[in-house]
Amino acid sequence: MLKSVLIGVFMVSTIGVTAQDTLVAQGSAPDLYLTHTVKKGETWYSLGRAYGLSPKDIAAKNKMQMDQGLSLGKSITIPLSKSNFIQSKEAHAGAGFRPVYHQVAEKETLYRIHVRFDKVPLDNVRQWNNFTGDGVKKDAYLIVGFVKGNGQSIVAPVAAPAAPVAKQDPPKQDPPPVVKQDPPPVVKQEVHQDPPPVATPTPKSQAAEPETRQEQPDSKPSTSLGRTPTVPEGGFEQQYLQQTNNGRNVVGEKGPGTWFRSNAVVGSGKYYALHNTAPRGTIVKVTNPLTGKSIYAKVLDAIPQLKANANLIIKLSDAAQDALGINEARFYCELSYDEK
């Protein structure tokens, strides 16, 4: 039986807002809490709305008075209580609820997690994370409940674009807003039997990621990396095997990833990725450890150095993400590739 692991990874203001990527619980029941770093424009009222609590309760937890205001960059403790932390089996992300994660420690068991998080039913944890059995893996992220709140607290940084809005459960929602980056990253086309997709960037007025571009009239997403890509037949698996069977070292990585829009086709076997250390043209094997599914993606370029991309180990085309059976904006994955 496949060992269960959560894919992981790496929310009143009148200013534009965006939700946090991952909420990681700290402490143990009955003193469970989240840590929130104050962003520009936030108030006690916006925090209360984002986390389903009275602003006075949050201020009291931090031994502060509401008339003191909030300092940019200050860490604020957000208590998780019966009033805002939901652990019923029917709870799910969306509709005013956000998942709260726990990062599995070394030698930690599912039973110990059950005790630490107010004896949350084990069946609930299995259902939220789509696995059976009791095995959990070190450093995996497991959903242990859901916090109330609409996520409208974190004010988008002025100097950097916001991260993409998380995908909802199928059917897919409209694509996240796209961002104009001046100048946008452009990938030079390689001379190769199977050229990577490239596209001419089309600016938009607002946005989330520099790798995205305006949708085409047929509503299919397209990549930010140049011309409309032509997806060749066949897959990259054979190239991966040739690269990794040449006697050189095979590198393994694990950590958070995210996605960008392209018009690559699910099931084609040819997917694309951005990666910081693998040279352009390298074929990377990407595995979803929760399901055991793997795909092979060709590296087009490095991940843009933006705040929204901090700590990522890979960015995959959306077709690759779908082929792995992943619906989250950020997810936990494992990589292997030839160290050239």
Image (cartoon, rainbow, N blue to C red):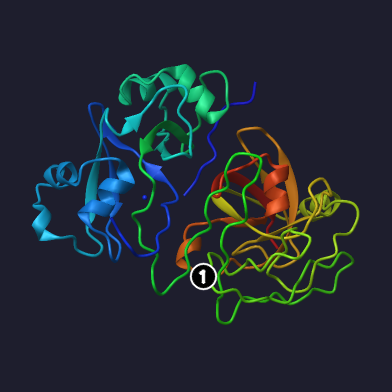
Which quadrant does the N terminus fall into?
top right
Residue 271's image quarter? bottom right
In depth, the one of 105 and 152 nearer the eye is: 152
Tag 1's secondary structure?
loop
In this picture, residue 214 sits left or right of residue 81:
right
Residue occupying the point 61% across, 42% down: 327
Residue closest to the far bottom: 183
Residue 297's image quarter? bottom right
In this picture, residue 253 sits left or right of residue 125:
right
Q: Is residue 79 above or below residue 191?
A: above
Residue occupying the point 9% across, 47% down: 63
Residue 31, position as x, y percentages in the image? 22, 31
Residue occupying the point 52% across, 54% down: 165
Residue identified by numbered label 1: 305
Residue 101, position as x, y percentages in the image? 41, 37
Residue 152, position as x, y percentages in the image? 37, 53
At label 1, the amino acid type is Gln
Q: Is residue 66 above or below residue 142?
A: below
Q: Residues within 10 Å of mark 1 (few under 14, many from 20)?
A: few
Q: Is residue 285 visible?
A: no
Residue 122, position as x, y percentages in the image? 45, 18
Which quadrant does the C terminus fall into?
bottom right
Q: Is residue 238 visible?
A: yes
Tally of numbered tags: 1
